Image (tube, coloured by chain):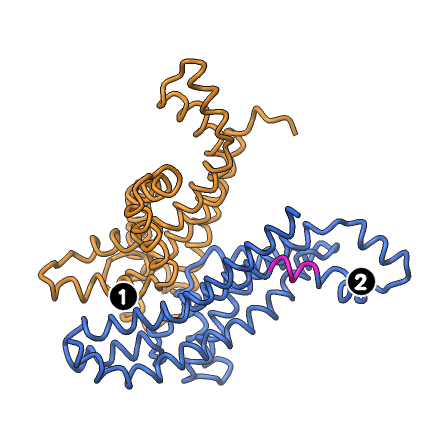
Chain colours: A blue, B orange
Amino acid sequence: MLEQMLKILPELGPGLLVTLELTLAAALLSFSVGHLIWWLRQHQAWLPSRLGSLYISLMRGTPSIVQLFLVFFSLPLLGLGGKPLLAAVLALGLNSAAYTAEILRGSYRNLASGQTEASLALGLSHLQCWRHVLAPQALRSSLPALVNEFTLIVKTTPLASVIAVTELTYAGQLIIARTYEAGPVMLPVVAGYLLVCWPILLLARRLEGRFATARNA
Amino acid sequence: MDLGIILAYAPSLLAGLVYTLQLSLITALPALLLAALLAWIRLRGRQPLLQLLARGYTDLILGLPLLVLIYVLFFILPEYGLTLSSPLVGVTALTLYYGPYLAQVLRAAFAAIPPGQFEACSALGMSRWQSFRHVALAQALPVALPPATGLFIGLLKDSALLSVVSVEEFMYAAKQAISESYAPLEIYLAVALSYWLVTLAIDAAAGAWERRLTRHRIH
């Protein structure tokens, strides 16, 4: 079994790399679109804030795998057919953006509203107030939750295997289809995910501990 | 877009949706039991070995994708002579996966209760069960309900992954319909809309229950 595993490992390497690429790309998309959705959601006007809420509700109310298939089958309409990796990045990133928006909303809500008033009274523009006063505090306090969200993206990447993106899980399945033995393949696959997720989870816990002590002090 | 296709496959899709609801509700019970056990071990367990096992198992699940867990149960267990039927793989995978997440919710809700209350309960002559039911649970339930609802919705959505091992739930019914009709967009849109409506209904029901549980509070 060990010998078989060692033979398989080099074949799984590229899959792990695709998993990491997919995670990073989706996380970047989630972070930027998440900000946009948060901004819409907190807007004073009725329409933008409704749109923001609707986006979050739709993304949280439907399974990621259905969203993935919808994106996958919609892309050809935009002339972008036959790009499963793009579909996976879009689906995972846009889904996670809803959760990122909610995390940001929680952090910004906890900031004292007097800070905005004070900034504006001091002559800062709304953008300057956000950039120099609110954002640094909110991003700091949302960091542990955002890092957790990152591991959730890692854990959603195997979905890409259903549209034939050769990430870690699909790379493993291809080998199983050839060798008819799941054990020696699934074990390294499981280890691969733990290897990626555990350091990030540890980081999230450290950050949580640090912010907890900072608040109590 | 041909919306007539959705009507043509409505009966089989509806059967799949009912299966998804049943599967999720049935799974909620063992998941809750596992979560209660894990939370109890973390809060009250005295055996270091049990603590270590609970922590190791929780960390394993936190780092393991659900789809991979489903594949492990479906492909590896038979190699060791244990073949579970597809629905059983589904219930087992979702239970094993959601147990630790729900345990975190329960642990946080119960850990927030000051220990002095239990001393007060025993001083008042209440039994352990009475102090659990009327003091601890009464306070922890409204705290745990919103995040637990979120997890139940997550469980319901993740049950769609079981279509990959041929559990005949909603997503599987959708795939069958698509393989006959070649209309993926129409059917997946209808499926997404149905999931959305179901989760909205669950959210509303949980919200009503939470208001009922906290109706004594003065805001």
Question: Residue at (53%, 55%) from the top-left corner?
Answer: A57
Q: In this rendering, would A86 be left or right of A179?
A: right
Q: Where does the image place residue A88, in percent across and percent down from the top left? A: 44, 75
Question: Residue at (33%, 83%) from the top-left corner?
Answer: A13
Q: Quadrant of residue B7?
A: bottom left
Assign a secondary structure to mark 1: helix
- What residue is pinned by disc 2? A129
Q: Which residues are magenta?
A: A137-142
* Residue B185 in view: no
Q: Residues within 10 Å of mark 1 (few under 14, many from 20)?
A: some
Q: How would you classify the magenta stretch by its main secondary structure? A: helix
Name the front one of labels 1 and 2. 2
- Quick check: marks 1 and 2 in contact, CB under 8 Å? no
Question: Residue at (32%, 64%) from the top-left corner?
Answer: B67
Q: Quadrant of the N terminus of chain A?
A: bottom left
Residue type of the residue flagged with mark 2:
Cys
Q: Nearer the viewer, residue A142 or B149?
A: A142
Q: Nearer the viewer, residue B75 or B133?
A: B133
- What residue is pinned by disc 1? B164
Q: Quadrant of residue B107?
A: top left
Q: Residues within 10 Å of mark 2 (few under 14, many from 20)?
A: some
Q: Where does the image place residue B190, in percent across and percent down from the top left? A: 42, 60
Assign a secondary structure to mark 2: helix
Do tags 1 and 2 sit on the same chain? no
Q: Nearer the viewer, residue A205 or A13?
A: A205
Q: Where does the image place residue A95, in percent across and percent down from the top left? A: 50, 65
Q: On what subunit does the disc labeled 1 rest? A: B
